[in-house]
Each structure stands twice: as C-alpha cells, then as structure tokens.
Image: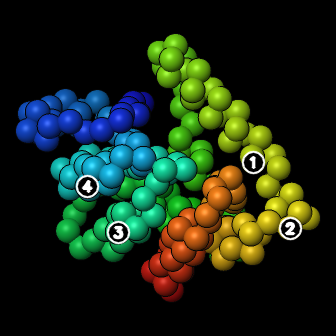
C-alpha cells in the first residue's frame, strides 16, 4: 500500500534526509503544491533522493518551472525516482488516446482530515464532472479544443483567462513524449 502525502512544501532537507529509511520503507509518495515556486526544486530534490514525488498542477502553476521539471523528469540522465504527473503521462501515452493525469490526484477520502477532506471532495467532484463533460470542448467554440496539448490536458485549465502558458506547456509536453517514444 502506498501512502500519498499532499504537502504545501518540503521543509528542511536536512530533516528529511534522516527520515529517508522510514519514507522508503513506508513507500511514501509526496505531492507538492504547484502554486509555490520553491516546490519545483523540492520535487526535484525528493526525486534525486529516490523518493517518489509529484507536483500538483493548478491554476497558479509556474509554466516555465513546470517545463523545466518535465525535462528533468523525462530526460534527466542521473538516476531519480519518478516525478508525477510526467511519468504517468509518459507511461500511459499512446498516439490518439486521451490520458487523464487527474486520476493521480484522486485519493482515499477516508484517510484525510476534515478540512483537507472538504477541499479534496470538492476537487474530486470537479474532476469527475470535468471527465463527464470533456466532449463539450468540441461542440462549443473554446480555445482548448484547438490546443495541440489537449490530449493530455483535457481542458483542465479552461477557466484560466490567459491560456498561453498552459497551451505552450502541454504542447511541449506532448511533443517531448512523442519524440521520446519514437
């Protein structure tokens, strides 16, 4: 069984290093908030310490930092643990098949505190509703329907006023995966 920890940040690395044997024995996975710029480097540190980790891509994501993290995750030559959602999309990707990395952020709601539970329940309902309605992108005129990266984003960021960052990021992500799988 894996235990996924959603955290706002990493904290002090020196405190974490002493806990590595426990973290690895418990097979802990860490997902950090993509709204905080320092978390992109923190995920890289966790991965380099062989700790399975990921970044939660949300409306406040730094698209440039996400792009750098994506290249580290998929092209890094130094051994490191998987970084999500990049590894999941890479593993699941097949040309002309939709990949919904939103499933990575779904968790067992019974294991969460009340405050986290309320937010996660709301996010899960939104993800489920989004999955049910993805077809509407093609019968309603939306910028997302014309985005080359739509097959892996599925319109998750349609609510953003400026979609330039997410479109460039998901398109580059998709192109990288296709090039790596050739």
Q: Judge from the rendering whether residue 142 lies leftward or rightward of residue 179; answer left or right.
A: right
- Which numbered disc flags the more N-terminal residue, 1 or 2? 1
Q: Judge from the rendering whether residue 139 lies leftward or rightward of residue 95; answer left or right.
A: right
Secondary element under disc 2, as helix, strand or loop, is loop
Residue 81 location in percent, x, y?
Answer: 29, 54
Residue 7 location in percent, x, y?
Answer: 36, 34
Categorize mark 1 by other alpha carbons within 10 Å: few (<14), some (14-19), many (20+).
some
Q: Nearer the viewer, mark 2 or mark 3?
A: 2
Q: Nearer the viewer, mark 3 or mark 1?
A: 3
- Which numbered disc flags the more N-terminal residue, 3 or 1? 3
Secondary element under disc 3, as helix, strand or loop, is helix
Q: Can you tell which mark lies on residue 68?
A: 3
Residue beneath disc 2: 141
Residue beneath disc 1: 131
Residue 124 location in percent, x, y?
Answer: 64, 34
Secondary element under disc 1, as helix, strand or loop, is helix
Q: Residue at x 36, y 46 (%)?
A: 36
Q: Nearer the viewer, mark 4 or mark 2?
A: 2
Q: Real-space Cα distance between discs 1 and 2?
A: 18 Å
Residue beneath disc 4: 41
């Amino acid at each position: 069984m894996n235990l996924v920890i959603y955290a706002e940040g990493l904290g002090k690395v020196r405190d974490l290093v002493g806990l590595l044997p426990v973290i690895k024995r418990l097979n802990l996975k860490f997902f950090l908030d993509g709204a905080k710029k320092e978390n992109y480097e923190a995920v890289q540190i966790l991965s380099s310490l062989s700790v399975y980790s990921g970044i939660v891509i949300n409306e406040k994501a730094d698209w440039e930092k996400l792009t750098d993290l994506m290249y580290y995750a998929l092209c890094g030559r130094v051994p490191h643990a998987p970084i999500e959602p990049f590894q999941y999309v890479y593993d699941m990707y097949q040309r002309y098949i939709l990949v919904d990395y939103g499933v990575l952020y779904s968790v067992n709601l019974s294991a969460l505190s009340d405050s986290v539970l309320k937010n996660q329940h709301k996010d899960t309902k939104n993800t489920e509703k989004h999955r049910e309605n993805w077809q509407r992108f093609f019968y309603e005129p939306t910028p997302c329907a014309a985005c080359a990266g739509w097959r892996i984003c599925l319109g998750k960021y349609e609510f953003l006023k400026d979609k330039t960052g997410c479109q460039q990021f998901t398109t580059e992500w998709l192109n990288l995966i296709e090039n790596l799988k050739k």
